[in-house]
Image (tube, rainbow, N blue to C red):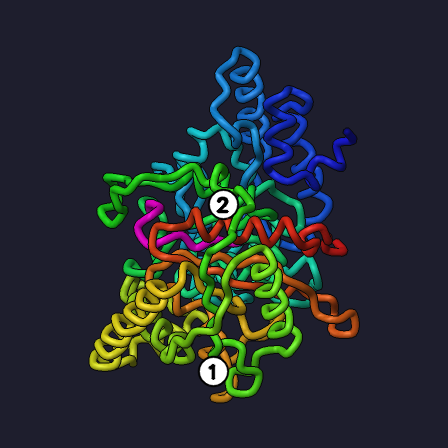
């Protein structure tokens, strides 16, 4: 195999070749580093590339595998992580000028777990400043979407989406508060899983909202996603909010058999008028439902009455909690924030306590609605967003009231599962017409808390019975 072809392998395919010693870990790392050098000037997906460290880790992995110390399917596989995940001795910037020289003394638990699994860290990925969710706010410049460089790769795990879709890492980690794994996955045509709240440790991850933040994979295939979540999931005594529940073998769950599963199609989120859902996306989601029905699942429409308001609810909670994390920076170094971040934080400071309190009460009602729906069905499906990736506006702006309302509505597609703590996955389910740019469209699949296995099983069955995932972005 030519080295230029290696980055286009899935993580699962590359894993098998490494295990059989048909490709060495160093060959894999070098292939990715060469592609990063060629392509990332256009995508700007990395903040820090660890070429020397990755090559040394690859040599170590090769020696371990040669003597029979094979650690598992991620051994020797090149990965990258969002730059709010602490990395020992390597700067962790949160994409902010304020944190540009911060070097942690310890690895985050998820990074420890990746390394224990034998994965090789290629570098730290771009993001929205402090994970706030603005695609242009990084102090290192915005990341770009491989399907159209003028469009957003999604927020706030901008680099995780761009790098994975651009074949600049085999799989990646993002962080999801209001939708920052699923949004980039949707915009970039990937598989992004927000695990159940409490499934994955957040120790060593710079927080945005303690009661909602979740770390999870952004990958090119469902099998790659299953490998990645399997490596990082589990109880961690350093994070008291992780749950002591067994972690299944997610890869073994990908049986392709979904006959008899009950799936609810959330009708409110297919409304092309009230919610502005792109008609092409609505059609693609309905077509995906037909595929699942054809595989033996029982699909019916269900209602989540509060769902259209969940974007406003989650924004109230997350912005209030975010700005409380570093009030001294806002007082002493306001000029060092990106203008959009500064405005968002200043506005968050004005949210009255009673509004925050009401949002928390509504959050409980939303969770109750979701969990009750999941008593009647096994899974819920809907669009991941209201439409394909939007064009990047590279100029700092406060925006109009109408734009703000639109953003809150669009956030509702993902916020409903952020508020409920349920696992939710975004998967490619089609493309807009060539005249509309041929951009990815995404289906979201959500399940009961701590039942990521069923979510992954249904996503894999859908993926294996469609061809959407075989397309490559033009970069």
Residue 396 percent across, percent down from the top left: 54, 75
Answer left or right for 58 relative to 208: right
First in sequence: mark 1 or mark 2?
A: 2
Residue appearing at x 30%, y 50% in the figure: 198
- How many residues crowd mark 2 within 10 Å: few (<14), some (14–19), many (20+)? many
Quadrant assignment, res 79: top right
Q: Quadrant of the C terminus?
A: bottom right
The span shown in magenta is: 192-201
Give the residue number, with chain letter if any, for mark 2: 81
Residue appearing at x 51%, y 63% in the figure: 444
Task: Establish if 91 lies above or below 335.
Answer: above
Task: Establish if 219 lies above or below 248.
Answer: below
Regarding residue 45, the answer to whether it shows in the image is yes
Residue 124 percent across, percent down from the top left: 51, 45
Q: How many marks?
A: 2
Residue 16 percent across, percent down from the top left: 61, 28
């Amino acid at each position: 195999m030519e080295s230029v072809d290696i980055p286009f392998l899935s993580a699962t395919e590359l894993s098998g070749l490494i295990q059989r010693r048909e490709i060495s870990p160093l060959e894999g790392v070098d292939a990715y580093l060469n592609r990063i050098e060629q392509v990332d000037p256009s995508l700007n997906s990395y903040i820090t590339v660890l070429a020397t460290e990755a090559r040394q880790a690859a040599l170590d992995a090769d020696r371990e595998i040669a003597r029979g110390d094979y650690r598992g399917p991620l051994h020797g596989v090149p990965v990258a992580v969002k730059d709010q995940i602490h990395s020992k001795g390597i700067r962790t910037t949160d994409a902010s000028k304020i944190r540009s020289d911060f070097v942690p003394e310890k690895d985050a638990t998820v990074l420890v777990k990746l390394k224990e699994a034998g994965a090789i860290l290629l570098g730290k990925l771009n993001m929205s400043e402090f994970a706030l969710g603005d695609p242009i706010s990084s102090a290192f410049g915005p990341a770009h979407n491989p399907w159209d460089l003028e469009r957003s790769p999604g927020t706030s795990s901008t680099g995780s989406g761009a790098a994975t879709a651009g074949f600049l890492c085999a799989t990646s980690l993002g962080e999801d508060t209001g939708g920052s794994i699923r949004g980039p996955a949707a915009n970039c045509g990937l598989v992004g899983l927000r695990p159940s709240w409490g499934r994955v440790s957040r120790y060593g991850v710079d927080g945005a909202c303690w009661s909602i933040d979740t770390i999870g994979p952004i990958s090119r295939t469902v099998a790659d996603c299953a490998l990645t979540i399997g490596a990082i999931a589990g109880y961690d005594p350093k994070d008291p909010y992780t749950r002591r529940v067994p972690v299944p073998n997610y890869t073994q769950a990908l049986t392709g058999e979904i006959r008899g599963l009950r799936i609810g199609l959330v009708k409110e989120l297919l409304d092309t008028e009230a919610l502005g859902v792109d008609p092409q996306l609505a059609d693609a989601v309905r077509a995906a439902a037909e595929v699942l029905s054809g595989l033996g699942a029982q699909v019916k429409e269900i209602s989540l009455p509060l769902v259209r308001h969940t974007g406003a609810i989650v924004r109230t909670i997350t912005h209030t909690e975010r700005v409380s994390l570093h009030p001294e920076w806002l007082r002493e170094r306001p000029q060092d924030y990106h203008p959009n971040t500064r405005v968002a934080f200043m506005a968050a400071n004005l949210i009255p306590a009673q509004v925050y309190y009401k949002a928390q009460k509504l959050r409980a009602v939303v969770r109750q609605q979701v969990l009750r729906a999941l008593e009647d069905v096994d899974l819920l499906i809907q669009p991941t967003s209201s439409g394909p990736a939007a064009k990047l506006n590279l100029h700092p702006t406060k925006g109009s009231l109408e734009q703000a309302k639109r953003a809150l509505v669009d956030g509702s597609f993902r916020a409903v599962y952020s508020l409920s703590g349920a696992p939710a996955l975004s998967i490619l389910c089609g493309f807009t017409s060539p005249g509309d740019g041929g951009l990815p469209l995404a289906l979201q699949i959500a399940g009961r808390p701590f039942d990521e296995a069923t979510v992954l099983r249904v996503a894999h069955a859908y993926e294996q019975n469609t061809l959407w995932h075989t397309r490559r972005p033009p970069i």
